[in-house]
Amino acid sequence: MRIKKITAPDMPTALSLIRESLGPDAVIISEEHNAKGELELTIALEEAEEISFDKEDRAEVRQARWKYDDEALRESLEYHTLLDVVKDRILARCRKISAEENIRDDKELLSRCFAQMFKFHDVLDCKQPVKMFMGVPGSGKSTAIAKVATQAKIQKLSACIISTDNVRAGANSQLQAFADILETNFRFVKSPRGLYDMVEDAKQKYALVLIDTPGINPFLQEEVEKVSLMTEAVRADMILTMDAGKNTMEAVEVADVFAEIGANYLLPTRLDLTRRIGALLSVAGCCELGFCGASVSSSIAKGLSEVDSLSLAKLVLS
């Protein structure tokens, strides 16, 4: 195996240098940033042949045997249409785990890999009681809030729903209806200052405070600023709801904008209607968003599921 270290200002430049130095079959073994903010990568290329000696100590060349054959895993990841940079990171980490811990099972390797690469969080974790939901129009934000409120009710956690959506009256009516059914307090506020005051009051009375924001076009700055003002007003788990079947490149571009205004968790919606989850893995890998659950059916009462490294691995390999 040939191993080399390279330094580059960003990942696209690094990938170009990798191809130039070791070719298209090279893989990334490790990645870190130096004090200058540059990427420092360790890359490797598995040699096609290795040298051995026969009984008379004569050198002979024979085909090298890979310790771990990642062909099946590579095909599965390609089926899910991940960004190449995220796919390569996953494969490299799986090979590293296999070599260090002598693991050959794809599901176990992938689960261990995801546990190292991604963050996983319980959306009902009350250590941070305030949860702010954001996303594009139609991403399932209001329904996700209703599902979280329902799960809170089942677990006997008091919850309050606050809407900051002064754009769509229908969204507020829907949330109000859900709140009435669940016997959960529903409030509406327009300004960031008003949101701050309302959240401070609600934290004294409820285990969970669920905040809805207007669905926005992330490529229109004036709309992004509406939500940005709200994220700056309170401390909260900032949760991006996203259709699990979204185009991978578009999903990463959208998530990157929301990450810039504070989103730190991803809650996929319509996961039951999706067969390829490359967009979700690419968003988590590129935008550093953790998983905090997923919407897996149209049922409000049973439509929210936890997400962990093993469940993601099963989805990739199923």
Image (cartoon, rainbow, N blue to C red):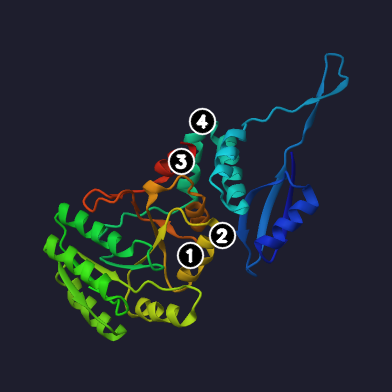
Residue at the disc numbered 1: 255
Residue 50: quadrant of the picture: top right
Of mark 3 and mark 4, the one earlier in the sequence is 4
At label 1, the amino acid type is Ala
Residue 296 percent coordinates (x, y)? 33, 48
In the rendered image, the residue lying farthest to the top is: 55
At mark 3, the secondary structure is helix
Residue 24 % position (x, y):
74, 47
Question: Quick one: label 2 or label 1, which is nearer the N terminus?
Answer: 2
What type is the residue that disc 2 sits on? Met
Q: Which residue is labeled 3 in the image?
A: 313
Q: CA distance from mark 2 to mark 4?
A: 30 Å
Mark pair 2, 1: CA separation: 10 Å
Q: Residues within 10 Å of mark 1 (few under 14, many from 20)?
A: many
Q: Helix, strand or loop at disc 2?
A: helix
Q: Earlier in the sequence, mark 3 or mark 2?
A: 2
Q: Nearer the viewer, mark 3 or mark 4?
A: 3
Alpha carbon distance from label 3 to label 4: 11 Å
